[in-house]
Amino acid sequence: MKAASVVRTTNSDIMAKTLEELGIGTIFGVSGGRILPLFQAINRRNGLRLIAARNEQGAAYMADGYARITRNCGCCISTSGPGASNLLTGIAGAYYDSIPLIVITGQAASDELGKGGIQEGSGVNRSPDIMGIYRNVCKTSYRLKKGDDAESAIREAYRIATGGRPGPVHLDVPTDYFLLECEDSGNAGIKMDVLDEPISDVPVAGDAIRRLIALLQEAKRPLLMAGQGVYAAGPTAIERLRQVQEACGIPVCTSLGGRGIVDETHPLSLGMIGCYGQDVANQYLLERSDLIVGLGISLQYLTTLGWNEEIAKKLIHVDIDRRELGRNLTPRLFIHGSLTDVLQAMPEARSRFAFEDPTGFIREQKSLHGYYPTYRVLESRNDPNYLHPAKAYSLLTEYLDNDDAVILDSGENAYWGMLSLKIRHPNRLFLNYGWGAMGYSLGAAVGIASVLKGSGKAYSVCGDGGFMMNLQEISCAVQYGLPCVWIVLNNKGYGTQMHWQRDIFNEEYVGTDMPDIDFVQLTNAMKIPAAKAVSETEFVEALLRAKRTDGPYLVELLVDPQAKPPQSLGSKLVK
């Protein structure tokens, strides 16, 4: 009779157990020798699911999408060497957009470090310093060593990733550390150094609140401008913003990262500001408002295009990150701290406000310009061989269910989406808006669909160029039965660059055209049903088939290569 086997608890088991306890239900990665012990440990946890990506970059995009839709921390894992470096583009995008991730990469065994071990990343001699690289795109990077408590390491990484301004945290783990036997030792131990961050999520001082209320008392036509920081502040902040909009009667516009925080069909919703925003939002901000309250918004270039110091004189900026002060202009008042305090104070003081009713003006401007300038940009050109991308997005909006999510890629497909989509519910539009990585939406859709399965669908909209950069990840949706729908806007090239070459470089097209690819056949080879559409009728029929399909589906949409997204009229008003 064989003796009963002894079950060993290793560091990898404790790490997997702790990730599960933190509510990170799905982990994304690519296997490799240096990370295999963690793969095996994850597989042994009933409450964890592992989705194996085809490339580490795709795994990072999946974890990013998972974190955005759950508003929790995401997790991606890879082996050492090229596995760790392949993750970097996705991690950089998450860092730029303040998305919390735990990034775990394997490393050469402890006794191999500095000796030229296989895929070693120690920074010794010609070995790349993987921790030094990651420190540029993470809040911190930490290498685990013998004696470090595995549970404490994961919990500390989670605390840092989700605290203050969220972002990725990197754990570099020698492969022998994963295999060390350990005790289930509680939560004592590790503290990781974090790059100095001028963050304050403490309550806002009473003096700052009183100054804000005093300025609102003087205003007649205030405007609230909400950014991604409202999402980061949590559901309470979102609900309070909607209460302020209703109770105080203040119009709300958003940045790209804030889309969906308020219902964009609401009479007091102006849509998105900035270069590719709605005309009514930009015109109200630039021409009509006499006080602007920016809430958790990064005043980046495309947001502030056309602004000048006159805008700064009427701007109040509320943010937890002092680095946002004076990014492109210096506001009249900067409030450093939690924006939920500001949102709570405003309805309480509404009896002291005497604002003009803005609804008539907003209704008139929407009627004049079109809230979504879809039909203003439809040139007289009407080629029956193509469907205009603005019209495609308008149709997509009509067929979206409340639980569906839309993930835009980078490039003109995203610009058309910014102009033409209507978002009614929070947390339903996603894109890699800071880093702007092409191919992002394909992987992110897998991560988002892993959460939506059984409720809504994840619609990835990308160009043909972006699709070719990450198409291998669509096979994951087949393997795991995920409700992904990919809509490929095929204009047979890199549209943004093609139009620059057309308009600036006298039609000298270099390196921007794409070969004639049949995306339907390409997708069918991966056992994914697909359809090609040219007309409105064909596109609607394809959307309906996608809705009826339990698993993944692809729609190839032939769009006019000459159609170029316009900049908002409002962004040109102030020079």
Image: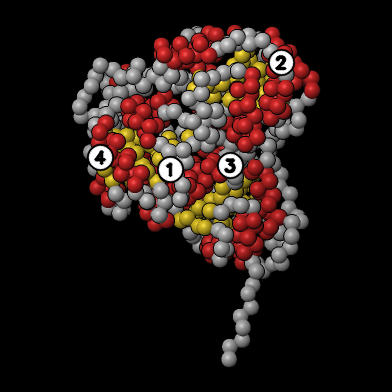
Mark closer to the chain start, 1 or 4: 1
Judge depth for marks 2 and 3 and give the one in front.
Answer: 2
Crowd band around label 1 with a 10 angstrom C-alpha radius: few (<14), some (14–19), many (20+): many
Distance from Cα at disc 2 to Cα at disc 3: 35 Å
Q: Residue at x 64, y 72 (%)?
A: 8
Question: Which residue matches tag 2?
Answer: 351
Q: Residue furthest left?
A: 384
Distance from Cα at disc 1 to Cα at disc 2: 43 Å
Mark closer to the chain start, 1 or 2: 2
Position above or below: 573 against 91:
above
Question: Which residue matches tag 4?
Answer: 532
Crowd band around label 3 with a 10 angstrom C-alpha radius: few (<14), some (14–19), many (20+): some
**Of residues 53 and 212, which is closer to you in this image?**
212
Distance from Cα at disc 4 to Cα at disc 2: 57 Å
Q: Amino acid at mark 4?
A: Lys
Mark closer to the chain start, 4 or 3: 3
Q: Amino acid at mark 3?
A: Arg
Disc number placed over residue 71 in the picture, else none: 3
Q: Secondary structure at mark 4?
A: strand
Judge depth for marks 4 and 2 and give the one in front.
Answer: 2
Crowd band around label 4 with a 10 angstrom C-alpha radius: few (<14), some (14–19), many (20+): some
Crowd band around label 2 with a 10 angstrom C-alpha radius: few (<14), some (14–19), many (20+): few
**Of residues 441 and 192, which is closer to you in this image?**
441
Position above or below: 478 against 226:
below
- Which image quadrant for residue 505? top left
Q: Amino acid at mark 2?
A: Ser
Q: Secondary structure at mark 1?
A: strand
Q: Residue at x 53, y 53 (%)?
A: 26
Distance from Cα at disc 1 to Cα at disc 4: 19 Å
Do the CB atoms of the residues marked 1 and 3 lie less than 8 Å apart? Answer: no
Q: Secondary structure at mark 3?
A: loop
Of the 4 image quadrants, the one containing the N terminus is bottom right
